[in-house]
Image (cartoon, rainbow, N blue to C red):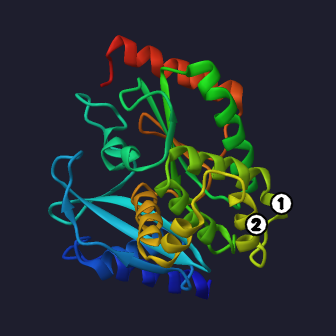
């Protein structure tokens, strides 16, 4: 009974003041913490509000959560008077329902295989070289996309190493960027090799394994050494991670099919049907 009274008083304090505005960051944080039942150990960073491109009369406000090495990004829509908060997806019926995602993805900056840049379907993968689920998904994509959707589907790869649980994933991504600097075939050879040998790689032996991979392949050792000493490949990985965070990616693999977000691995039968559906939609010219 005493707990209920304290809870009620907290509720009056939080909700009973008409002058409160969600455009005030401490007020929004308190409301979100209560609404989402967030423990005090979860840190929260709230971005400045920006006029929403999808919901008239609202601001877009990104809320970034972090706890025990894990991160999560959430979008909240806050009304211009600061009174209302909306969490969810907003759509403009004159555009693809996934246009906001398409606008943020940068597949042309990433290694890609399959169809050309003007493919009917663009499949973007956020992956982690140390992720076992990614290993299965990526192997299927590499084998089946070119064979079944050669001139229709283009697959691009975004690095998204989960450093809190995968200790060598970040370095593997940096190495991958350096491989990409030597050409797309070199990157995809490395991509396939590292997933095939994932279970044998450790933090301690990654460098030696990369040297083994490079021997006898179209890899210039001097260029690789120079690239790894540079800061640019790390910056490229960090930018890929930032794009993922802006799209609320929090796990791997995460796929975007013409902007449609799919979290976690999808079995091939379902993925194949979805790709065929997207091709049909593109051919009809609808939702674009």
Q: Looking at the figure, which quarter contains the C terminus?
A: top left
Q: Identify the residue at image location x=26%, y=70%.
A: 22
* Residue at mark 1: 199
Q: Examine the rendered structure and indicate whether residue 114 appears above or below residue 44.
A: above
- In contact (CB < 8 Å): disc 1 and disc 2: no
Q: Position of residue 221 (x, y in %)?
A: 60, 66
Name the residue at the right extreme. Answer: 200
Name the residue at the top extreme. Answer: 284
Q: Position of residue 67 (x, y in %)?
A: 57, 78
* Residue at mark 2: 209
Q: Identify the residue at image location x=75%, y=72%.
A: 208
> Judging from the image, what secondary structure is the residue with disc 2 in?
helix
Q: Is residue 99 left or right of residue 179?
A: left
Q: Earlier in the sequence, mark 1 or mark 2?
A: 1
Q: Position of residue 65 (x, y in %)?
A: 48, 73
In this rendered view, identify the residue nearer to me: 107 or 196. 196
Q: Identify the residue at image location x=83%, y=60%.
A: 199
**Residue 169 found in image quarter:** bottom right
**Residue 98 found in image quarter:** top left
Q: Position of residue 64 (x, y in %)?
A: 42, 71
In this rendered view, identify the residue nearer to me: 236 or 218. 218
In this rendered view, identify the residue nearer to me: 26 or 157. 157
Give the CA separation, mark 1 to mark 2: 12 Å
Q: Identify the residue at image location x=58%, y=49%.
A: 186
């Amino acid at each position: 009974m005493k707990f209920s009274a304290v809870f009620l008083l907290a509720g009056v304090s939080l909700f009973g003041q008409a002058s409160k505005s969600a455009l005030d960051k401490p007020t929004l944080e308190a409301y979100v913490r209560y609404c989402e039942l967030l423990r005090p150990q979860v840190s929260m960073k709230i971005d400045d509000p920006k006029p929403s491109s999808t919901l008239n009369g609202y601001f877009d406000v990104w809320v970034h959560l972090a706890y025990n090495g894990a991160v999560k990004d959430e979008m909240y829509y806050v009304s211009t008077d600061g009174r209302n908060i909306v969490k969810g997806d907003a759509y403009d019926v004159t555009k693809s329902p996934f246009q906001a995602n398409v606008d943020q993805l940068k597949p042309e900056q990433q290694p890609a295989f399959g169809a050309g840049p003007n493919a009917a379907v663009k499949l973007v993968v956020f992956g982690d070289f140390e992720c076992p689920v990614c290993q299965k998904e990526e192997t299927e994509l590499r084998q089946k996309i070119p064979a079944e959707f050669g001139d229709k589907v283009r697959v691009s790869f975004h690095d998204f190493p989960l450093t809190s649980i995968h200790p060598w994933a970040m370095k593997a991504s940096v190495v991958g960027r350096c491989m990409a600097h030597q050409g797309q075939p070199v990157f995809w050879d490395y991509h396939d090799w590292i997933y095939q040998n994932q279970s044998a790689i450790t933090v301690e032996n990654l460098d030696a394994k990369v040297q083994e991979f490079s021997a006898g392949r179209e890899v210039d050792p001097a260029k690789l050494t120079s690239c790894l000493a540079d800061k640019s490949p790390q910056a490229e990985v960090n930018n890929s991670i930032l794009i993922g965070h802006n799209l609320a990616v929090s796990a791997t693999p995460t796929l975007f099919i013409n902007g449609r977000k799919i979290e976690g691995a999808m079995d091939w039968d379902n993925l194949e049907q979805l790709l065929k559906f997207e091709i049909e939609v593109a051919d009809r010219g609808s939702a674009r």
